[in-house]
Image: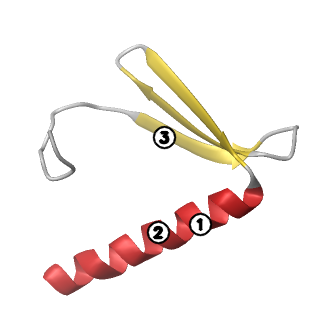
């Protein structure tokens, strides 16, 4: 499966700081919980990648 493969899965996404100075991306889907912690610099890199993907998606429409 690739990023372009559609799926009918409902998920919840939460993003916020932890009490340890990390940024947590927390995903819950179908009873599975996935907490992912990142250093602030890593989180900024991820944010940049999301912005770049959003810009690329706009150019496709």
* x then y, percent, for residue 19: 87, 38
Q: In the rendering, which numbered label is found on residue 45?
A: 1
Which residue does the image show at 28% across and 79% down from the upper left? 56
Answer with mark 3 or mark 2, whichever residue precedes in sequence: 3
Q: Residue furthest right?
A: 20
Element assignment for label 3 = strand
Q: Is residue 45 above or below residue 22?
A: below
Q: CA distance from mark 1 to mark 3?
A: 18 Å
Q: Is residue 33 above or below residue 52?
A: above
Q: CA distance from mark 2 to mark 1?
A: 6 Å
Left or right: where does residue 31 sit relative to residue 61? right
Q: Residue furthest bottom?
A: 59
Local crowd at mark 3 within 10 Å, few (<14), some, or many (≥20)? Answer: few
Q: Is residue 35 above or below residue 55?
A: above
Residue, disc 2: 49
* x then y, percent, for residue 41: 72, 63
Q: In the rendering, which numbered label is found on residue 13?
A: 3
Q: Are circles 2 and 1 on residues that touch, CB within 8 Å?
A: yes
């Amino acid at each position: 499966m690739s990023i372009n493969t559609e799926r009918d899965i409902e998920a919840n996404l939460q993003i916020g700081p932890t009490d340890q100075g990390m940024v947590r991306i927390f995903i819950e889907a179908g009873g599975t919980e996935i907490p992912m912690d990142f250093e602030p610099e890593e989180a900024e890199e991820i944010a940049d990648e999301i912005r770049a993907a959003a810009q690329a998606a706009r150019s496709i429409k």
